[in-house]
């Protein structure tokens, strides 16, 4: 299914497959359009996929690149785990956690960066850049290093220290901007007009966003070529949310999997919930907000794909919900205690929204549900501080017994 053109999502005008992202006629966003397939044999296609590498490149047929790149950090093929103890706690039936923290730089951003960077190399770019809420910075710096390309990474100056350190180590040009993500994004949009750089989430955005489809493909494959009934996904710009849906749709259209598109539930932090607010108000557009939340990786106040996320949640019978910072911390803790997976704040948002849906009775116990855990807890360590007890003792048995008795008395 070779990529054919870039096409405007609003007016359908088409453009060549180069570094551009906005329609010159109507300013709508561009996305990749593929040539229609003739004579698809689903069995043959399935066999081809299964013979591929254990990375997103087993899905090259569905991605906007001419060929899989060589010698890069392999992203994807992360575990899909059945989470029975979490399901029991929430009163749910068949529940799975897709753990995308198990990527090279510990978030789902390795998928989207891999695709954008592969296309950028095909187009001849020497320098890669991004406007990041944190995880994108890690991924761009690492994948550029692996490919031997120069990189510029722009982040809000108040980013978590763990994410800053885990980016700088790769030898990128790390630029901390005194402003929030939306300021960083505006600056980078201006810079992309001044420099011959591939900004993965600006002028390469149509390619970048296609990378998220691989989360849907993997889910289907790991379920034995079956669909979930419902998925819960975090929303920042709304790219992940809408492209996971696109992934399921493509495979249903091709006959690779039977059934219908799952119900889509979006998850936002209350401190930055422009899409959840629009959903609740019955609006089909988002009002920009100023983010104030511990879920910094989701802190986009003006989400580019907000209207499409709203449309998807409504059309699929789902919803978009928001949770407070305390609920996010509780979500991190619940996931850790029931599955052994330590997620960052974005994963806490997803689990807290899953819990809210379960409590509200929105999920039938007969449903097969997949929750997307998109990042690693070690990157937002501060949120774990103060959430548990620790004993400090002298290195003697007596000291241990004493502490043990004291703690038992308190409990
Ligand atoms: C970037 C990111 C998302 C989703 O971002 P979108 O802009 O909505 O695609 C989700 N979780 C984490 C951890 C992220 O870093
Ligand atoms: Zn247009």
Image: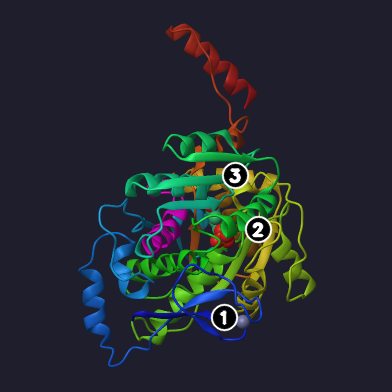
Seen in the picture, residue 321 relative to 291 is either above or below; the reply is below
Which mark is on residue 31? none
Q: Which quadrant is the C terminus positioned in?
A: top right
- Please rate how many residues cluster around mark 2, counting C-alpha atoms within 10 Å: few if below 14, some from 14 to 19, many from 20: many
Nearer-the-camera pick, 377 or 182: 182
Q: Is residue 51 left or right of residue 357?
A: left
User: Where on the picture, by quarter, is residue 219?
Assistant: bottom left
Q: Is residue 246 visible?
A: yes
Residue 221: x %, y % from top left: 33, 70
Q: Residue at x 66, y 38 (%)?
A: 158
Q: Which residue is mark 3?
A: 155
Q: Which residue is mark 1?
A: 8
Q: Which residue is mark 2?
A: 268
Q: CA distance from mark 1 to mark 2?
A: 27 Å
The reply to whether discs 3 and 2 touch (Cβ–Cβ < 8 Å) is: no
* SS state under label 1: strand
Q: Is residue 106 left or right of residue 271?
A: left
Residue 72 in magenta stretch: no
Name the N-terminal-most of marks 1 and 2: 1
Residue 124: x %, y % from top left: 37, 61
Residue 329: x %, y % from top left: 63, 43
Name the N-terminal-most of marks 3 and 2: 3
Seen in the picture, residue 67 relative to 170 is either above or below; the reply is below
Residue 114 in magenta stretch: yes
Residue range in magenta is 99-120
Name the N-terminal-most of marks 3 and 1: 1
For ligand 1, tell me if the residue under mark 2 lies within 8 Å.
Answer: no
């Amino acid at each position: 299914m070779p990529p054919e053109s870039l096409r405007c999502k609003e007016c359908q005008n088409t453009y060549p497959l180069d570094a551009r992202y906005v329609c010159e006629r109507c300013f709508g966003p561009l996305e990749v359009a593929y040539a229609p397939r003739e004579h698809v044999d689903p069995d043959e296609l399935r066999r081809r996929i299964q013979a591929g590498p254990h990375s997103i490149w087993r899905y090259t047929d569905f991605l906007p690149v001419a060929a899989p790149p060589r010698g890069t950090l392999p992203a994807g093929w992360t575990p899909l785990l059945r989470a029975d103890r979490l399901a029991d706690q929430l009163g749910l039936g068949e529940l799975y956690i897709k753990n995308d923290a198990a990527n090279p730089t510990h978030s789902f951003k390795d998928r989207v960066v891999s695709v954008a960077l592969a296309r950028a190399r095909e187009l001849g770019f020497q320098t890669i850049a991004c406007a990041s809420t944190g995880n994108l910075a890690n991924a761009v710096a690492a994948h550029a290093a692996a490919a031997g390309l120069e990189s510029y990474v722009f982040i809000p100056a108040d980013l978590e220290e763990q994410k800053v350190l885990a980016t700088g180590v790769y030898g990128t040009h790390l630029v901390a901007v005194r402003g929030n993500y939306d300021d960083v994004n505006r600056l980078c949009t201006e810079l992309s007009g001044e420099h011959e750089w591939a900004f993965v989430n600006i002028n390469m955005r149509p390619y970048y966003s296609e990378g998220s489809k691989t989360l849907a493909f993997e889910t289907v494959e790991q379920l034995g070529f079956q669909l979930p009934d419902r998925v819960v996904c975090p929303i920042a710009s709304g790219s992940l949310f809408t492209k996971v849906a696109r992934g399921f749709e493509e495979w249903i259209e091709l006959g690779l999997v039977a059934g219908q598109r799952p119900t889509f539930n979006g998850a936002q932090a209350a401190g930055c919930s422009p899409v959840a607010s629009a959903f609740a108000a019955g609006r089909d557009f988002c009002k920009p907000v100023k983010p104030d939340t511990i879920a910094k990786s989701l802190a986009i106040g003006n989400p580019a794909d907000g209207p499409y996320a709203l449309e998807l949640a409504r059309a699929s019978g789902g919803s978009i919900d928001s949770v407070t910072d305390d609920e996010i911390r509780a979500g991190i803790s619940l996931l850790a205690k029931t599955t052994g997976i330590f997620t960052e704040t974005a994963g806490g948002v997803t689990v807290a929204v899953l819990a809210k849906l379960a409590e509200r009775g929105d999920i039938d116990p007969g449903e097969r549900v997949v929750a997307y855990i998109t990042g690693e807890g070690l990157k937002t360590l501060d949120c774990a501080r103060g959430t548990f007890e620790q004993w400090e003792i002298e290195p003697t048995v007596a000291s241990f017994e004493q502490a043990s008795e004291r703690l038992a008395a308190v409990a």
